[in-house]
Image (spheres, rainbow, N blue to C red):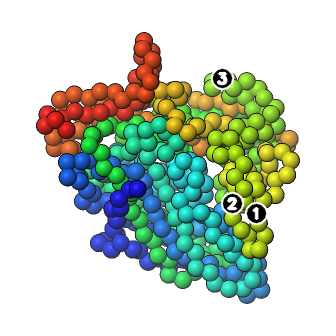
């Protein structure tokens, strides 16, 4: 279980916002992060933001709102620090993407808080608490802490949390508004390690391509910096998801519109069995899980959980109109970096559709592990204030003679004092 380091805003641990007709921001700083716990190194495992907000249904009544639609209240999150750059960029980290993808994957295919009861359609105010988690430690990996940075490297960081306008949920329930004083709090979860390592940094990024561009989507610049400072070209591609138009994911169309997929650069031949991606993904996350939450007095359908929307009743095919994303690539439990494909450049994804969309944008989310340049690694070591004697790659079941296994792996730092 991690320890907790509060983030502050002008010395306060809570920011009060009043929702309005425009997006509002709460900004926290990572000041004086813990540099040591005894002789051990505190490593940041996750950033957590807690939001408390009032949700007011119209006097005439509206439409009931399920928990998995509520993350839309968070417009976006942007997290950066001077040493490492932008770790979680705002254009990627919308509320729904953070909640249903970044948190869900990073926590090991589970949510931190779980689903609250449905907000009824009748007139009334409901106090809603939401938690948004941005993990550094990827719990699906064999060694999750190998992607966790030392707290000292996050010094003078900025964590900006944006809430949407009062009418952000109006498209789901006419007349519904978010109101009252909104309280935002944030903290870092961390754990301690007797050894310091240079992490393989996990970076989520959303790529877009115009829907009017035909059947081929071109993801430009996969493996480029995308906001991080001084990282080497190329990345280990751990996850590749095509977002849909559901639950605020913001893409041009639904997953069920896709009738075939080919990704030649990843070795994926043309397949019309789009259901197969969902079947494989569900096996990764636990397969048959049972109902995930109650909707008022009605039990939610057995399959109505990530990647499905909660209110779905998906009988028959798995590739449904209510899926939040199509999982083309995802890590299994106890995944190893050295077994993941390294990619750099333009990635082509070729699909056919029942009815090809010609407006909006296709959106794809990737989880890429990044390696810092040698110059940046040296700077990171200097920030510790200690003299390093050597650094060594951390392998999992190293296969001799394969130089490609060396890239984008964490490095253990050995210091002159023996730590």
Q: CA distance from mark 3 to mark 1?
A: 37 Å
Write down the residue under mark 2. Answer: 292
Q: Tell me which label, 2 or 1, sits earlier in the chain.
A: 2
Task: Give me the C-alpha separation between circle 2 and circle 3.
Answer: 35 Å
Residue in the image at 52% along x and 74% along y: 52
Residue that protrudes farthest toward the top in the picture: 401
What's the CA distance linking mark 2 and mark 1? Answer: 7 Å
Residue 408, image x and y in percent? 42, 30
Residue at (74, 74) in percent of width and height = 296
Mark 2 or 3: in front is 2
Residue 136 vs 392, above or below: the answer is below
Q: Is residue 294 left or right of residue 313?
A: left
Residue at 45 percent of width and 56 percent of height = 78
Please tell me whether mark 3 or mark 1 is closer to you in this view: 1
Query: Which numbered disc covers residue 148?
Result: none
Query: Which residue is denoted by mark 3 in the rendering?
Result: 267
Element class at badge 1: loop
- Specify whether 165 is left or right of 383: right
Reading the image, the residue beneath label 1 is: 300
* Residue 378 x/y as whole percent: 24, 34
Q: Are marks 2 and 1 in contact (CB under 8 Å)?
A: yes
**Lower position in the chain sequence, tag 2 or tag 3:** 3
Query: Which quadrant is the C terminus positioned in?
Result: top left
Q: SS class of the residue under badge 3? A: loop
- Crowding at mark 2 (Cα within 10 Å: few <14, some 14-19, many 20+): some
In the rendered image, which quarter is residue 15 located in? Answer: bottom left
Q: Horizontal and vertical percent for residue 55?
A: 62, 78
> Are circles 2 and 3 on residues that touch, CB within 8 Å?
no
First in sequence, mark 3 or 1: give its number.
Answer: 3
Query: Residue sitting at 48 percent across and 44 percent down?
Result: 138
Q: Quadrant of the N terminus?
A: bottom left
Q: Is residue 9 visible?
A: yes
């Amino acid at each position: 279980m991690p320890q907790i380091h509060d983030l502050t805003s002008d010395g306060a641990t809570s920011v009060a916002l009043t929702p309005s007709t425009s997006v509002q921001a709460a900004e926290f700083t990572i000041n004086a992060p813990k540099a040591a716990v005894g002789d051990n190194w505190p490593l940041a495992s996750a950033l957590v933001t807690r939001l408390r907000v009032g949700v007011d249904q119209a006097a005439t009544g509206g439409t009931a709102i399920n928990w998995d639609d509520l993350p839309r209240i968070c417009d976006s999150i942007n997290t950066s620090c001077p040493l490492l750059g932008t770790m979680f960029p705002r254009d990627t980290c919308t509320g729904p993407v953070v909640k249903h993808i970044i948190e869900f994957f990073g926590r090991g295919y589970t949510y931190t808080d779980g689903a609250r009861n449905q907000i009824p359609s009748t007139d009334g105010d409901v106090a809603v608490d939401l938690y948004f988690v941005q993990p550094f430690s990827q719990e699906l990996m064999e060694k999750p802490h190998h992607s966790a940075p030392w707290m000292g490297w996050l010094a003078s960081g900025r964590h900006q949390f944006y809430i949407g306008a009062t009418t952000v949920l109006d498209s789901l329930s006419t007349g519904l508004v978010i109101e009252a004083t909104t309280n935002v709090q944030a903290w870092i979860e961390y754990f301690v390690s007797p050894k310091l390592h240079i992490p393989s940094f996990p970076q989520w990024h959303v790529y877009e391509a115009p829907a009017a561009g035909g059947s081929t989507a071109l993801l430009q610049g996969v493996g480029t910096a995308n906001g991080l400072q001084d990282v080497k070209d190329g990345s280990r591609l751990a996850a590749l998801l095509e977002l849909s138009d559901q639950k605020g994911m913001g893409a041009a169309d639904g997953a069920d519109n896709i009738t075939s997929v080919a990704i030649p650069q990843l070795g994926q031949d043309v397949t019309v069995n789009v259901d197969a991606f969902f079947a494989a993904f569900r096996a990764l996350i636990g397969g048959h899980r049972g109902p995930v939450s109650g909707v008022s007095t009605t039990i939610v359908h057995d399959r109505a959980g990530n990647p499905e929307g909660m209110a779905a009743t998906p009988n028959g095919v798995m590739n449904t109109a209510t899926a939040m994303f199509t999982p083309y690539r995802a890590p299994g439990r106890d995944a190893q970096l050295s077994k993941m494909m390294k990619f750099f450049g333009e990635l082509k994804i070729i699909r056919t559709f029942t009815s090809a969309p010609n407006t909006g944008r296709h959106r794809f989310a990737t989880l890429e592990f990044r390696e810092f340049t040698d110059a940046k690694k040296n700077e990171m070591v200097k920030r510790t204030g200690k003299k390093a004697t050597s650094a060594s790659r951390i392998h999992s079941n190293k296969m001799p003679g394969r130089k490609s296994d060396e890239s984008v792996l964490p490095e253990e730092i050995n210091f002159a004092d023996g730590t």
